[in-house]
Amino acid sequence: ALSTGTTVRVEDDTFTDRDGRLLPVAYSAAPIMVDQDVQGLVVVFTDVSARRAIEQRNKRELETLSWVGRNRDALDEERLVLYAQPIIDVNGREVVAHELLLRMVDRAGAIIAPGRFLPAAEQFGLIEEIDRWVLAQAIKLAGRGIKVHFNISGKSLGSRELISDLMRGLRDSGAAPSLLVCEITETALANDEAVAEAYVHELRVLGCEIALDDFGTGYGGFSYLKRLPLTVVKIDIEFVRDLPENPQNQHVVKAIVNLAEAFGRQTIAEGVENQATLELLKQYGVDFAQGYEIGRPA
Ligand code: C2E
Ligand code: MG
Ligand code: MG
């Protein structure tokens, strides 16, 4: 602006304020002209945080929408697969069950994690169909005598179709219902508590076991422990991963074990990434463990 005498506008820059905070800004610089000479410059900054936030939200929403079609295609083209991750008994170290974890295979054969495609399915209604497909696979494995944990979304709690699939599947396969462990997250239960609670009871009456997933990350944990007919509580990765170095997490894990024991529930620690963690879990009386140190989902 100084050299050419024209106004310059910049739409996308970053401004560092006195406290060192970075602000997204647009600015214009206009020369002050006196008798054809540039005598100075007026610079006006505009904070564009709000606009930037809207742009980013739109981008995220577009990304989610783009997954809706891809989920439909994956279901139709049978490009969903289940990986299995072993769960061991902490004392004897033998494998007692496997958790089934969903993956999508894209048309080029690449594996896509559930965190990328499930949010769109949950938001736009395909999740029930996906959860029913997962249940069907779980029942087949249970029919062969394999104990499996499967995850269902909060959106599917209340699904009549899922329950009738389960009843029919159990009858046709002759699978022992106790070989099926349904994993439900704390946050999923919070959606509609009355419906969720009735649903969990129904699953339990059919003989399936119930695991409360990601325990410790939601708000209702203690009350679910008391009210729901849970079999087992899964201690969230967040409290387990760095257990040997993190005294606060050690307190949390010990407290969860005490609490679960008081209510007659078993415990599974998720996200065990080293032997030192496994040793501590044994000391604390955790029943089962799962994690990369024991076996990756495969
Ligand atoms: P989740 O049920 O809590 O599953 C545990 C997640 O932790 C899995 O991620 C697993 O791969 C990962 N994990 C296991 N061991 C370790 C470890 O040692 N360290 C670390 N850092 N991570 C570990 P994944 O497979 O990406 O699944 C993410 C979530 O997606 C699951 O959390 C579950 O909520 C959901 N999900 C997975 N499969 C299904 C499904 O079939 N149906 C539904 N509705 N949700 C599913
Ligand atoms: Mg799970
Ligand atoms: Mg979990």
Image: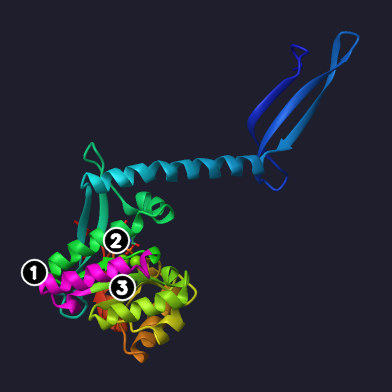
x, y (%) of residue 143?
11, 70
Q: Does the magenta run of residues contain 97?
A: no
Q: Nearer the viewer, residue 74 or 185?
A: 74
Sequence-wise, which precedes: disc 1 or disc 2? 2
**Disc 1 marks which amino acid?**
Arg
Identify the magenta region: 156-180
Q: Which image quadrant for residue 295?
A: bottom left
Return the x and y of residue 119 as percentages of the image width and height: 40, 53
**Of discs 1 and 3, which sits in the foreground?**
1
Closer to the camera: disc 3 or disc 2? Answer: 2
Q: Residues within 10 Å of mark 1 (few under 14, many from 20)?
A: few
Mark 2, residue position: 131
Q: Nearer the viewer, residue 169 or 13?
A: 169
Residue 64 visible here: yes
Nearer the observer, 43 or 82: 82
Quadrant housing the N terminus: top right
Label drawn at residue 269: 3
Looking at the image, which residue is at 24% across and 80% down?
206
Residue behind mark 1? 144
Q: Residues within 10 Å of mark 3 (few under 14, many from 20)?
A: many
* Earlier residue among tags 1 and 3: 1
The alpha-carbon separation of the residues under discs 1 and 3 comes to 26 Å
Mark pair 3, 2: CA separation: 24 Å
Q: Are marks 1 and 3 in contact (CB under 8 Å)?
A: no
